[in-house]
Image: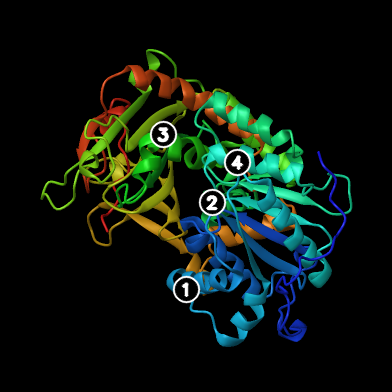
Amino acid sequence: MSDAAPAGAAPSGAPSMASGAPANTALRKTMKSGRTPQPQVLVIFGATGDLTRRKLLPAVYRLFCEGMLPEGFAVIGFARETMDEDAFRERMRAALAEFATAPSGEEWARFAPRLGYVGSVFEDPAGFGRLRERLEAADRELGTGGSRLYYLAVPPGVMELVAEQLGRAGLVCHPKSECFTRIIAEKPFGHDLESARKLNDDLHRVFDEKQVFRIDHYLGKETTQNILVFRFGNLVWEPVWNRNHVDHVEITVGEAVGVEQRAGYYEKAGALRDMVQSHLLQVLALIAMEPPSSYDADSIRNEKVKVLRAVRPIRGEDVAHDAVRGQYAASDDGKLPGYRAEPNVDPASRTETFAALRLWIDNWRWADVPFYVRTGKRLGARHSEVVVRFRPAPHPILDMVEGDKPASNALILQIQPREGIALLFEAKVPGMRGELRQVSMDFDYSRAFQKESPEAYQRLLLDAMLGDATLFAREDEVVAAWTLITPILEEWARAGEPEPYPAGSWGPACSDALIREDGRAWREIEAG
């Protein structure tokens, strides 16, 4: 790995990134001790792409406006498109107005000078030379001291090239030096087990594992983060969080939208790669993990890896029994097109837009408890949740009630669009008859705290700037997840076509059959 290069002279005529930026110490909010990042420069590779415009720049701008960034901070965009820095700043201002909040005059006047840009193809070493000059200028003007956070908002095939170029240009600090270098790798991290291992090896030729932050935005959502607090901070839940009391667990990530403009990516990925390998397995690991010995990043990630390694592999003939796939067809009313009719989709495509798995975790806590996971596009609603369904009472009060036996209790962790927690339990309907009805005790984040949850990328970017890797996947987590998913992908590549389901429904019939054959059913989710 390369040591950080010494600061050199700024290129002649290079605009100052901090010129005209007045001191704003009095305007900044005080952060809790230890939660303000050190001075550093964030470099976004793929800075003209959709992810930067929709998520990354809005997240950085909110952090800046809320006083959570250090005085010594700058953002440098790097992309193939040729433009000057003023044009880049105007493009980012338009992105903020479209996807966040229109920048105010005062805040934008302080933020804009901290935006820089380097236009270059990733294959050109000269472009990384110009990047080095801009970084050295930021070191002199803002006191960033050679510390960098690189964000790879680029396809997996480009990540290796960018890492190699950064190493050759001397833009990576040694892990034990005074400055720091961290690199954020956006999903998908690889295409299968072999490609994920190769990408890890490629990054490790330049970066130490502790410098690599593999991002999954689902782990930045408030409910996902709160799973650990909910489980381990409240004594009432942990004693029943096991096979003795839990009947089964459902994890649903539903999307109402179709493939939209992502057909080029989605045709190569599909639902299993795009969602299950990352989002759903990460949530499953948080739900199923053992209490960590401490709450540092490695202790938590150690327990998550143990869960993934304990998941029983689905291979060969088991794939037909424990894994189902679907592809959305036109809606029943004909208003929504089928996947194969979407622009840039192969009319004979076998890519799955829906996937559901029945998983078993072979350890002491979860033996014989099935985990059902499902995800898909063009479903009945944009809705993501975890349902922990408990076993029925051992001595039901059938003599006291009329009708069917009481429904089992359920705990619902709602991830999106509403973030909150609900407990479903039985209560007697007022009156002379012994009628029971399931009722809900609800907790809603926005109502309870009178504030909106921050965007996931806000939290994750701040953590990466702080060097806190708790919510980022470690190398062995990625390998464990791909070890589970790759055999299913290989079997599906040899099998027939995915089962069609009408757009706007909750997936193919085979998904309902998967859970129904165990005498269970997916929790009904209201449309809209």
The amino acid type found where label 4 is placed reads Met
- Furthest-left residue in view? 333
Whole-number angstrom distance, CA of label 1 to CA of label 3: 34 Å
Q: Nearer the viewer, residue 286 or 94?
A: 94
Whole-number angstrom distance, CA of label 3 to CA of label 4: 22 Å
The amino acid type found where label 2 is placed reads His
Residue placed under numbered mark 1 in the picture: 94
Q: Nearer the viewer's eye, disc 3 or disc 4?
A: 4
Q: Quadrant of residue 74?
A: bottom right
Q: Nearer the viewer's eye, disc 1 or disc 3?
A: 1
Colour basis: rainbow
Instruction: Give the mark nearest the N terminus, 3 or 2.
Output: 2
Q: Nearer the viewer's eye, disc 1 or disc 2?
A: 1
The amino acid type found where label 1 is placed reads Ala
Residue 159's tag is 4
Whole-number angstrom distance, CA of label 4 to CA of label 1: 27 Å
Helix, strand or loop at label 3? It is helix
Instruction: Give the mark nearest the N terminus, 4 or 2.
Output: 4
Whole-number angstrom distance, CA of label 4 to CA of label 2: 18 Å
Whole-number angstrom distance, CA of label 3 to CA of label 2: 17 Å
The amino acid type found where label 3 is placed reads Leu
Residue placed under numbered mark 3 in the picture: 272
Q: In which quarter of the image is residue 359?
A: top left
Instruction: Give the mark nearest the N terminus, 3 or 4.
Output: 4
Mark 3 in CB contact with mark 4 (< 8 angstroms) = no
